[in-house]
């Protein structure tokens, strides 16, 4: 029996007499992040309206959006220290092929953005607890199960340290 495993799909297809077995492909978290980013937004570097992004909200990097059930809600607890790099966070947040917060939010430092989410331009003024902000970005469903915001943590869009950088950037918005 010959087994062919497709590059991205979760299924291993068996040609021959045997039944088709499924075996999830084992990939590192780093590889998961890399693939997620590669597929994050279609096309070039131009601003894309969030409504037309096929990966929003998307729960897996290996299959088209909507083909998998959403992952379980992840409650996380992060209370600091932040140690984030605001400059890096800004670059992540405004890059449509990276964090792409700008697709839905106005951001600090004069970045006009989409209006699907509330403006975060002066988010720093509100002095929200780190735990709140981190959870919002990691998995927004804890606050609003229907929120149209990507699952940055469970979806492996951003790493923990990238989320910290983005928070440091949001804090500059006064
Ligand atoms: C596809 C749209 C979308 C994208 C992309 C998005 N968000 Fe959101 N965001 C929302 C929506 C919608 C809400 C409001 C959710 C609700 O009603 O609870 C929200 C809420 C938030 C909040 C809570 C705001 C408050 O007033 O307390 C924070 C913080 C936030 N987003 C940060 C981010 C960051 C940082 C990024 C990028 C890493 C990001 N968002 C990307 C749609 C988005």
Image (cartoon, rainbow, N blue to C red):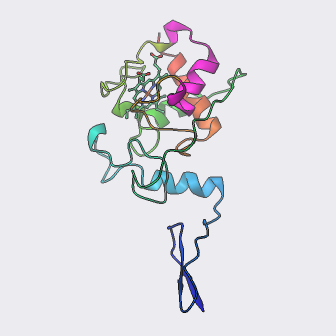
- On the image, the x and y values in percent for residue 149 come to 42, 33
Predominant SS along the magenta part = helix
The foreground one among 29 and 44 is 29
- In which quadrant is the N terminus drawn? bottom right
Q: Is residue 106 positioned above or below 39 on the image?
A: above
- On the image, the x and y values in percent for residue 41 come to 36, 49
Instruction: Report whether residue 87 is seen.
Output: no
The foreground one among 2 and 44 is 2
Instruction: Report whether residue 163 is seen.
Output: yes
Residue appearing at x 41%, y 39% in the figure? 95
Residue appearing at x 40%, y 22% in the figure? 107
Q: Is residue 163 positioned above or below 57 on the image?
A: above
Q: Is residue 11 positioned above or below 62 on the image?
A: below
Q: Which residues are magenta?
A: 124-142
Q: Quadrant of residue 120?
A: top left
- On the image, the x and y values in percent for residue 53 come to 32, 45
Residue appearing at x 57%, y 33% in the figure? 138
Residue appearing at x 45%, y 33% in the figure? 93
User: Is 84 on the left-hand or right-hand side of 45?
Assistant: right
The stretch drawn in magenta includes residue 161: no
- On the image, the x and y values in percent for residue 171 come to 54, 17
Q: Is residue 70 positioned above or below 68 on the image?
A: above
User: Is 141 on the left-hand or right-hand side of 105?
Assistant: right
The stretch drawn in magenta includes residue 138: yes
The foreground one among 171 and 28 is 28
User: Is 144 on the left-hand or right-hand side of 130?
Assistant: left
The quadrant where ligand 1 appears is top left
Q: How many marks?
A: 0
């Amino acid at each position: 029996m010959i087994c062919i495993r497709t590059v991205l799909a979760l299924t291993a297809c068996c040609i021959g007499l045997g039944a088709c077995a499924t075996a999830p492909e084992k990939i590192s978290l780093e590889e998961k992040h890399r693939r997620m980013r590669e597929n994050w937004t279609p096309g070039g570097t131009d601003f894309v309206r969030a409504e037309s992004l096929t990966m929003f909200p998307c729960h897996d990097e290996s299959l088209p959006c909507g083909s998998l059930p959403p992952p379980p809600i992840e409650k996380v607890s992060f209370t600091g220290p932040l140690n984030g790099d605001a400059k890096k966070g800004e670059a992540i947040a405004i890059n449509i092929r990276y964090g792409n917060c700008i697709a839905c939010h106005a951001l600090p430092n004069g970045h006009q953005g989409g209006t699907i989410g509330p403006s975060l331009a002066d988010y720093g003024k509100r002095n929200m607890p780190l735990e709140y902000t981190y959870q919002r970005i990691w998995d927004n469903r804890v606050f609003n199960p229907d929120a149209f915001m990507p699952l940055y943590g469970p979806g492996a869009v951003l790493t923990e340290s990238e989320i910290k950088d983005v928070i440091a950037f949001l804090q500059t918005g006064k």
